[in-house]
Image: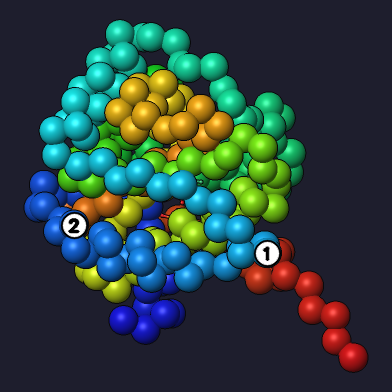
């Protein structure tokens, strides 16, 4: 698959079939993604791939916690600043509108929104979950390395006919994830990623993007 095609067809898919994904495919993707760049090549990503019974158990524990109104695990990083200033606040609001429109959920139907959010901890039906950890001692540039790595993984998954959804939502139940992955104490969870084959019957709204004029400045001679 052409790189442009991979970029254009990647999106956060929130409906997967239960078709299994062979470990060999995931290994091929992660071996290639290891070529991602990182400052001084320190490769700060620590990845756990969870499938089968351990994933079924994790989905069960996490969804039961959320359904019971269990409080989130205390945060290890701030997902968004409390006041998202312009233009980020507007973009986030537009994303929420699009997402709930696709689901046919009214803006103020908080119960339906909560039900939809639970899909996160079911991996939207996906049979594979990837969890990305970082050493607590590392800083902002290394966090950006993680982003490059994760995007590389997502593009390579497209080349394999697979889809993905990156999910910070998993950090809200990070202790339940840790109970399965059992990372060394210096590692903290950044995010999860659901991986599998798309269920084409699940509706979605394609998220737009800000224009080049809004995000890029050319300084030309
Ligand atoms: C680091 C990161 C965390 C995300 N966390 C979640 C999440 O917890 N749940 C979810 O449904 N989508 C999550 N997303 C997906 C974004 O909402 C999505 O990428 C964005 O709206 C753009 O849409 P697109 O990826 O479909 O083009 C996350 C994306 C990133 C990059």
Q: Quadrant of residue 116?
A: top left
Count of numbered tags: 2
Q: Which quadrant does the C terminus fall into?
A: bottom right
Give the residue at x 61% y 64%.
41
Q: Nearer the viewer, residue 25 or 15?
A: 25
Q: Which quadrant does the N terminus fall into?
A: bottom left
Residue at mark 1: 40
Q: How is the image coloured?
A: rainbow
Where disc 1 sits, the SS reads helix
Give the residue at x 74% y 39%.
85
- Tell me: 134 left or right of 46: right
**Is residue 134 visible from the viewing direction of this image?**
yes
Q: Is residue 26 above or below residue 70?
A: below
Residue at mark 2: 23
Q: Is residue 151 above or below residue 189?
A: below
**Is residue 98 visible from the viewing direction of this image?**
no
Label 1 CB-ligand 1 distance < 8 A: no
Q: Nearer the viewer, residue 179 or 63?
A: 179
Q: Is residue 144 above or below residue 160?
A: above
């Amino acid at each position: 698959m052409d790189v442009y095609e991979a970029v254009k067809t990647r999106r956060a898919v929130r409906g997967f079939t239960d078709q299994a994904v062979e470990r060999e495919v995931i290994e091929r993707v992660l071996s290639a993604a290891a070529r991602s760049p990182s400052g001084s090549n320190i490769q700060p990503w620590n990845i756990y791939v969870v499938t089968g019974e351990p994933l079924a158990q994790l989905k069960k524990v996490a969804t039961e916690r959320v359904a019971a109104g269990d409080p989130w695990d205390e945060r290890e990083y701030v997902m968004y600043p409390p006041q998202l200033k312009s233009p980020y606040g507007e973009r986030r609001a537009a994303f929420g509108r699009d997402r709930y429109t696709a689901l046919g959920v009214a803006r103020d139907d908080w119960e339906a929104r909560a039900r939809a959010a639970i899909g996160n901890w079911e991996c939207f039906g996906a049979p594979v979950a990837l969890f990305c950890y970082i050493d607590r001692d590392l800083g902002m540039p290394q966090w950006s390395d993680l982003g490059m790595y994760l995007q590389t993984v997502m593009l390579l998954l497209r080349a394999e006919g697979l889809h993905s959804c990156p999910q910070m939502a998993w950090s809200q139940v990070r202790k339940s994830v840790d109970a399965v992955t059992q990372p060394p104490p210096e590692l903290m969870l950044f995010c999860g990623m659901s991986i599998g084959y798309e269920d084409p019957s699940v509706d979605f709204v394609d998220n737009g993007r800000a224009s080049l004029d809004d995000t890029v400045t050319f300084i030309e001679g």
